[in-house]
Image: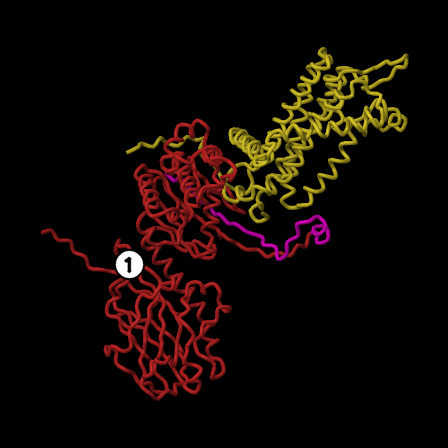
Chain colours: A red, B yellow
Amino acid sequence: MNSVSIQGVSKRFRLPDQRFNSLKERVLHFGKVPYHEFWALKDIDLEISEGTTTGLLGRNGSGKSTLLKCIAGILQPTSGQIVVKGRLASMLELGSGFHPDLSGRDNVYLNGSLLGFSKKDIDKRFDSIVEFAELSEFIDSQVKHYSSGMYARLGFAVAVNVDPDILLVDEVLAVGDEAFQNKCMDRIKQFQREGRTIVLVTHGTDQVRQICDYAAVLSKGDLVYSGDSLESIRSYRDILVTDANDDSVHLEVAENEPEGEPLGVWDEKSNPKYGEDLLNVGVSKGSEFYKDRTIEIVSVTFRDKLGVVCNSVMTAEPLIVEFEYKSCNIDEELFAVFSIYSVRGEIIFRNFFQDGLYSNIKLSQNGTIKFNIDQVPLLDGTFKVSLELLNRENQVIFQRDSLDSFSVTNPTKNVGLVNLQIKPSVE
Amino acid sequence: MVVRTSVTSDQIRVVRAQKGLKSRISEIYSRRELLVFLVKKELSTKYRNSTMGFAWSMLNPAFMLGVWYFVFQVVMRTTIPDFVVYLMTGLIAWNFFAVSLQSSSAAVVENAGLVNKVSFPREVLALAKVGQAMVFFVLQLSVLIITMAIMRFVPNFSQMYLLIPAVIDLVLFTSALCILVSALNVYYRDIQHFIEVLLFGWFFGSPIVYSYTATLATHLANRHLTWLYLANPMADIGMTFDRVLYGIVYYKTKGVGAYILPTFSTTWFFGMLGGIFLGSLILMLIALKVFQKLEVNFAEEL
């Protein structure tokens, strides 16, 4: 049986270009308030069966939270309908119904009541709510004196303790300290054992891998994929990589600027969306002094073991990264420094240029610099690569920031950043 | 392993663009407990952090009463006997109406956080303001009763039953308007300020601080405009309150007699209140319909 049946749901937002809230402005601009339409959801059909855990994956603005709000009944779809069977509790924002001036106790009742539960229901569960939130000492003080962690804990405790048939969760599992997060996760798993339906919005593919039976991938309001959670992760990765590489297209245009400009310097304004994902590696310090020495990167290509151009590889498979360049007039020997970054900008790997392991290279006018990775030791994720060229005096002559990304799909159930071959042994 | 009970048919909920009015009303009714919690929240937070606290809910109308008493009794020497009782009677009904309308106009806007994050019938937010005013209404009514007892003033017990339809009308009419303005105010934030002005005028269009019969009645009757005055539900409800709680229709002093209240018969009162009830019911249905229509875009407007 389906717990949630989403039937041809579309949601249109009208975003006014200018806001006319006062009567005068409304009268003056009557009937011609400038707005543009934005379809946050486009004809979505999705069946969520009872007792399953479904993840909703997608980039920011893909419509996943809008879909969740429609299921929760906070937003009404512009067309189509959603049939929800069973009691539903939504955790869109923890403690959203809390009033700062009320005591924790009063807020539990108010919040529970907002979620649709009767006073009797809450009476029965009050003690377990307080116990779960670890707030028995503070339950009678005003919540405005609570820390944000306490606030979120109480919110979570109310939502999970009111016995819902369907639980909607929107990226709220990252609250509180680690111990509380584990507790939340345990509770979610308990819910799964009890055969409740969970719909979870998340960016974290690890979460999907760990707890979801199924997942649906949304992109720009379209349902791209729905089904098996591992397949969904792959589909989500593809979107991430495609979007990221689409974004870098016009960055390469920016690079072909008049000579003498420092090359490959990240222009934040040209693409603010990805700015947060990139690490500012530092401006190429040498470019001032080496203006006459230029090199232009034409393209960055990722190839799999067969040499096929491919932006995603499986864990433990080979990967070749190629930097094709032209118009190089540097004739001295160079060190090539290759780095891999996570999307958060942490350095996953960077070779050190002086330890002799990496031989010097000499560049001709046009050519390709290749890096071979025998076995990609990474688990899930999207990773960015960068290239720096240094001369003998360790001066950076050229720097290509991490604009290009590849993704790794992890076929196993292992979770984390790196792939280790672990074999347990007993002695 | 907990065995989940199967879902009963009444737990099936459909989310779509337009729902019937009937299912909406039953939804609001099913969340009446939430209404109680919201009223409690309003009451316990409204005067939080003020030294006088809840006392303000009584001090405010008491102060208003004092000012009007001074203006009409001391300055203008009104001919209305036992003016304090007359004034309190009218003000009780009016305060309920005015406080509800004033506070509910902002009800949805000030709860934007809730409206965007939690699913519940949003009409409840406006109704909670009415509920809060209802608590003040009961408190003020008890003060009136105490005042009457102290003054040894005897109300019109024989027609006391008229108070029931009058209060029902008052609550229904107020609630309908409140639901309407709370939704409209999301789109036109001017409503909130406009209501302040409107209430000021409306106050003087209703027989609260003056006696309609002793002042306006003959002028309006001569111009065949009595119906215009009576078309204001707050005038009719106020008159009913006056008839029941104050009850001095005709007053004779030093050999000169004067009518203080209209001489309407009980049948007339019932007819009038019945009319308001029907009108308010229609207004309520319109308000719910409008609210439902506007609610769709609340999330974008807030």
Is A7 inside the magenta-drawn segment? Answer: yes
- Please, what is the three-letter code of the amino acid marked with disc 1? Asn
Estimate the x, y position of residue A358 in percent, counting from the top left: 25, 78
Q: Quadrant of residue A4?
A: top left
Q: Residue furthest top?
A: B158
The chain holding disc 1 is A
Is B291 inside the magenta-drawn segment? Answer: no
Residue in the picture at 41% in, 84% down: A294
Estimate the x, y position of residue A59 in percent, counting from the top left: 43, 57
Q: Residue furthest left?
A: A427
Viewer-closest of A366 and A83? A366
Note whether residue B23 is visible. Answer: no
Q: Is residue A372 left or right of residue A12?
A: left
**Neighbour class for label 1 at 10 Å: few (<14), some, many (≥20)?**
many
Viewer-closest of B40 and A164? B40
Estimate the x, y position of residue A82 in percent, counting from the top left: 47, 42
Write down the residue under mark 1: A410
Where does the magenta region start and end? A1-30
Residue in the picture at 33% in, 80% down: A394
Q: Is residue A372 left or right of residue A298?
A: left
Question: At numbered mark 1, what does the secondary structure look like: helix, strand or loop?
Answer: loop
Q: Is residue A212 left or right of residue A246?
A: left
Estimate the x, y position of residue B81 in percent, counting from the top left: 81, 18
Q: Is residue A77 left or right of residue B239?
A: left
Viewer-closest of B74 and A219? B74
